[in-house]
Amino acid sequence: MLSRRSFALSVLLSVIAGRADAVEQDFAAWLQGVRRDALAQGITVATLDRALAGLAPIPRVIELDQRQPETTLTFNEYIERVVSPQRREAARDRLKENHALLQDVGRRYGVPPRFIVALWGIETDFGRVTGSFPVIPALATLAYEGRRAAFFRRELINALRIVDQQHIDPRHMVGSWAGAMGQSQFMPSSFLLYAVSYRGDAAPDIWSRRDDVFASIANYLARIGWRADEGWGDEVELPPGFDLSAQPRLRSVAEWGALGIRRVGGKPFADRSRNAGLVAPQGLEGPVFLVYDNYRALLKWNNSSYFAIAVGYLADSMTQR
């Protein structure tokens, strides 16, 4: 006869097992709904059988999703971490190593090579850290019980579409826990919109082909409004008593200058007619920038002023010594 303690333990284990079975059944039913949606959007049965076979939630993905920390870094701390001296030096090395390829990609898409290298470096440390999670199971996990289920369900369908179009075998489709893929860290929707083959005769490979990585980054920037004839921004000095809160979203550089705003170092602005916004990522306690259309394009890649300025800093560091 079981002791009272052993009986209680067996009941607890039965309850846990029952809950696990219930979760598994709920997930299987949910996945059937995804399958129906994908079929309705033209994805083939063969693709779904191949990509969804044996699929199960990944507990580690949910753990990482639920433990996302609040942003606590100051702007200066973020820049020190993301645009470290080591990364600046590595960026200059990668720019030199890939000079011919980057020059060709830059001419083709109208994007300076230093910005291609900067995004590559910040996103994956120049292809070194790309993630090892299987993308389709990770997206399915987040779509099933993540904080942004609707968003990740759309990305899951897009990932299935990528497989259906024979861009990649699902077994080789790996990325971050949140589904960002390859050396450029494209979400599936971005892959479908912007990933390109440099050679033009094969499926884009942002996982292992550096030429496709560079071309895809440049194509993304070109398609979201990159202007080849201008930089991203200038660090500026404000006149005494300047009220940041009372300023409009955009003014011409000449108009900002008339208010007493000057470039740090005293150099004249390259173009006083273009529109610029004033950005102070850490308020008056940190640096202030006049930013241009290319800054706003970088925000479409990642809607973070810290990120966009870091890309600009790293790109600019490749022209400095």
Image (spheres, rainbow, N blue to C red):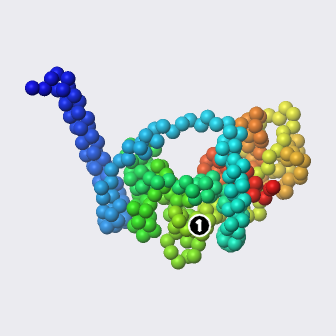
* Badge count: 1
| Outermost residue toward the left in this view | 1
10 Å crowding of disc 1: few (<14), some (14-19), many (20+):
some
Question: Which amino acid does the dot numbered 1 rest on?
Answer: Arg
What is the x, y in percent for residue 296? 68, 52
Q: Quadrant of the C terminus?
A: bottom right
**Which residue is at the front of the view, 228 or 123?**
123
What is the x, y in percent for residue 173? 44, 60
What is the x, y in percent for residue 213? 58, 65
Question: Is residue 165 at all visible to an observer of this figure?
Answer: no
- Taking the spot 87% from the left edge, 34% from the top edge, the residue there is 240
- Taking the spot 61% from the left edge, 48% from the top edge, the residue there is 303
What is the x, y in percent for residue 135? 43, 55
Q: Quadrant of the N terminus?
A: top left
Dot 1 falls on a residue whose secondary structure is helix
**Which residue is at the front of the view, 285 or 155?**
285
Per the image, the residue denoted by label 1 is 210
| Outermost residue toward the bottom in this view | 201
Determine whether 279 is above or below 93 in the image. Answer: above
- Taking the spot 69% from the left edge, 48% from the top edge, the residue there is 83
Q: Is residue 5 left or right of residue 155?
A: left
Determine whether 272 is above or below 69 in the image. Answer: below
- Taking the spot 58% from the left edge, 59% from the top edge, the residue there is 127
Determine whether 101 is above or below 242 in the image. Answer: below
Question: Is residue 264 at all visible to an observer of this figure?
Answer: yes
Q: Is residue 133 left or right of residue 279?
A: left
Q: Is residue 272 left or right of residue 196?
A: right
